[in-house]
Image (spheres, rainbow, N blue to C red):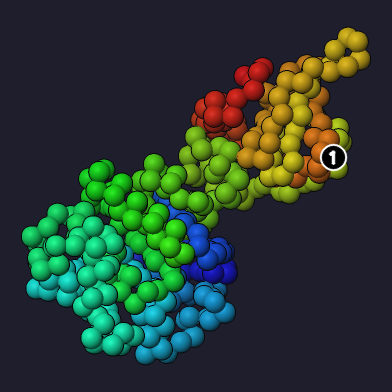
Amino acid sequence: MSEVVKVFKNAGGEFTALNRVTACFYAGEFVSVVGKSGSGKSTLVNMLTGIDHPTSGTVRVSDIDIHRLSENDMSVWRGNNLGIVFQFFQLLPTLTLLENVMLPMYLIGKYAPAEREERALRLLERVGLRGMEDKLPAAVSGGQQQSAAIARALANDPPIIIADEPTGNLDSRAAEEVFDLFTNLIDAGKTVLVVTHDISLAKRTSRTLLLSDGELINPWVAHALPRLAHSEMLWLTHHVQPVSYPAGALLPIDDENSEWLWLVTAGQIDLVEATTTGGGRLIASLPGGSFLAGREIQPGWLAHAGADRPLELLVVAGADFTHWCDQHPAVWTGLKQSRRLHPFSGGQ
């Protein structure tokens, strides 16, 4: 998806649910989308599934601009390419679990009628529900209903599974079991995108996108500084600038302005304390995903790009950062808490 904007209009005015969101998803990935309520997670999913249309921007799946398809073509495309799992299961209450799983096969006609029941039984067995195929949804637990919904999403063997808060109505044990099913799907070659509010479950995915106020937070900011509030991460996302240095270069630590922040995206920073003999004592090597703040620097410390490869940074510096820290005292608290996750000797 590229530069996707979604604006909703109502009697009270306009509300921007997504603001210039650009994201890529790759075959075989297990990706989570997280964010607070109202951050735009479900709207983003609706853009990807074609359930809703963007105000501007494009959504392309395998070179198909899906929002240019007619409604009929969209239905066919969705049935063949997407398996969708909802928070509230959306199983038809008067159909058995077997019949619920078979239903998408009838709608798309991908499999011959004689094959459908056996395929549905295999899918129910795959999610641990063999022997329950004749039960109605109300007769099984919430976790079992969600497992049946996953089997239904696999009915037409789609390459992509999209799940919107699939564990939102489940207890922790059932949620773990559902995530185990998603992990198994990755092993089988599927691409899985899961929207979740549960950070602990999101950590089980290979990549996480963090949304705040309809915008994607820079993933390096989210990784390096997880203890900042989402609004503070978003501020940083708007203000970081890329900077690079050759391997071994001395980095410009500005003693006159301690209010700067470096996020390492490639290479490493070697932090050194100068000695009286003219050498240096290595304090820490900060690899990709680490950060260094100006006010952490002590007298006599030097910073070098690692000798093995060029250093790439995202940098926030100058009056904007100073003003931001002054206006938001909790920022430095968040930086210190994040430092505990990326510690080094001498950190304040």
Q: Which residue is drawn at 55% across and 64% down?
A: 26
Left or right of 326? Residue 260 is right
Quarter containing the C terminus: top right
Q: In this view, does 183 lie above or below 22?
A: above
Q: In this view, does 120 lie above or below 304?
A: below
Q: Which image quadrant is residue 291 in?
A: top right
Q: In this view, does 217 lie above or below 284?
A: below
Rendering coords of residue 159 (x, y %): 44, 71
Quarter containing the N terminus: bottom right
Name the residue nearer the viewer: 187 or 194: 187
**Can the viewer see residue 238?**
yes
User: What amino acid is found at the position of numbered circle 1 in the picture?
Assistant: Ala
Left or right of 307? Residue 144 is left
Q: Which image quadrant is residue 301 in?
A: top right
Rendering coords of residue 22 (x, y %): 57, 64
Residue to which mark 1 is pinned: 247
Q: Which residue is drawn at 43% across and 69% down?
A: 160
Rendering coords of residue 337 (x, y %): 52, 27
Q: Residue at x 49, y 34 (%)?
A: 227
Instruction: Tally the marks.
Output: 1
SS category of the residue bearing label 1: loop
Q: How crowded is mark 1: few (under 14 residues within 10 Å), some or many (20 or more)?
A: some
Rendering coords of residue 336 (x, y %): 56, 26
**Can the viewer see residue 313?**
no
Name the residue nearer the viewer: 286 or 160: 160
Name the residue nearer the viewer: 177 or 214: 177
Q: Residue at x 47, y 74 (%)?
A: 54
